[in-house]
Amino acid sequence: MARFSIIAPNRKEIVPKQITSIEFDQLLQVAGRFPAGAGIEDITKQLEAPIARRTLQRRLALLVAQGRLTLEGGARASRYQLPDHMPEKESLSYTFRVAESSPMERSYSYEAEDIRHAVSAAVQNRKPVGYNRAFLESYHPNETYYLPAALRQRLAAVGNSLSGDQPAGTHARKVMDRLLIDLSWNSSRLEGNTYSLLETERLLQMGENADGRSTREAQMILNHKAAIELLVDQADEIGFNRYTILNLHAALAESLLSDPGACGRLRSIPVGIGGSVFHPLQVPQVIEECFHQILQTASAINDPFEQSFFAMVHLPYLQPFEDVNKRVSRLAANIPFVRNNLSPLSFVDVPESDYLDGILGVYELNRVELLRDVFAWAYERSCARYAAVRHTLGDPDPFRMRHRGLIMEMVGEVIRRGMDKKAAVKFILLSAETKASGEDRAQLVTVAETELTSLHEGNFARYRVRPSEYYAWRQVWR
């Protein structure tokens, strides 16, 4: 299951202070006092608070990689100094390294990797923190941006799906069948749900539970379907308002909470986050106030991508509900896309560890860089999923190219043997376990299942199956 979960907040850990953008600025200020360059010892003596040598070296290396410092010499002779021409000053919270690689490959910023390092430390070595209301209050719609302008433009370029004015929800309805399966499966998977893609499809289309899976997992997926249908069916009415967010929670939490009356209601009890040192708000009145402020702020944001990401940051950070907060934020992130006929965000291929580390970065550090990079990469992957023409997919997926022969063999065998979805799930899992390395198995299963769900009469020949075999298999598959 997911790496952290809601628990009673009774933990007490003491840990060293985590890195902040202010500390980066302090290092730059210290380096500026040495025009000829400063060594590690020089910088250490000038710092107001001591930093472990290895930690200091890592932070200096990050600044060098960003072009904010230059490095000469090596080992004990290393000298750090400000470059002749400093890059444009920009808050570390909002910098973004635009990847030149294909959107099929993840490429995270240096700041994001720093967050991953910080939240990967043992829990006992991380500083306990509470909800920081100033993090929300410091955000001013259409003045503050978590997503840089270049990134917003880039996402808009790949996300625009329709030409001309169309009623809200038009694009979502066109891809509804695929969206229901993709978003229900991927969002559930990020919560530790063990259903496979094909098992999810069987559950949603035929109401058939997977063998060996809990009813709770099936309920989670079915709840996602209901929540997605709510967004698309009421595209003209949804928004960042109490009606939408509370009803999203009610749909996603149905039959999953110990108190049925908590579905669609802000919490009145304290909660904690297992696996994290973050302690959410406990006072119901303050939770209500912050929830109202989040909705007001989100509603005032003009850019749909910034609006989407703001919801992904602040809804789970507040923890307004007893549980199911992250799921609500992922569905709420699609509100601007449904309303503006942009390609939806279905979290295709997003690794659970990357997403959870990004959320932890918000919880414990109030830093958005890692979650931002995950969001951007996930959106481009989702756009590729729903693209109408092949050229919008970008470069070929390296994983698919590397395993092309095995994927063709697996998919072809499913067709030739006339397997139904239940048999295909077992066959693909067994093939992956016996023919792929440990780190590739899960992705291989996903790719093979995705290929099977995407087959039609215009593309099956590449798997070296006869028309008679394909049409006979389709009868069983349906």
Image (cartoon, rainbow, N blue to C red):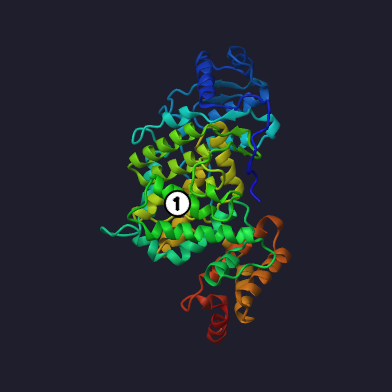
In the rendering, at what x and y percent does residue 270 appear? 58, 36
Residue found at x 36% / y 46%: 304
Left or right, 138 with reference to 15: left
Q: Is residue 139 left or right of residue 190?
A: left
Q: Position of residue 182 (x, y in %)?
A: 51, 61
Vertical position of residue 233 compared to residue 273: above or below: below
State the image quarter where residue 342 is shown: bottom left
SS at mark 1? helix
- The residue carrying mark 1 is 247
- Residue 324 place in picture, x, y as percent: 55, 48
Is 240 left, or right, of 456 in this rendering? left
**Rendered view: 405 above or below 93:** below
Front-most of 67 and 452? 452
Q: Amino acid at mark 1?
A: Asn
Q: Residue furthest left?
A: 164
| Crowding at mark 1 (Cα within 10 Å: few <14, some 14-19, many 20+) | some
Q: Quadrant of residue 413?
A: bottom right
Quarter of the image for the C terminus: give it.
bottom right
Residue 101 visible in this rendered orientation of the protein: no
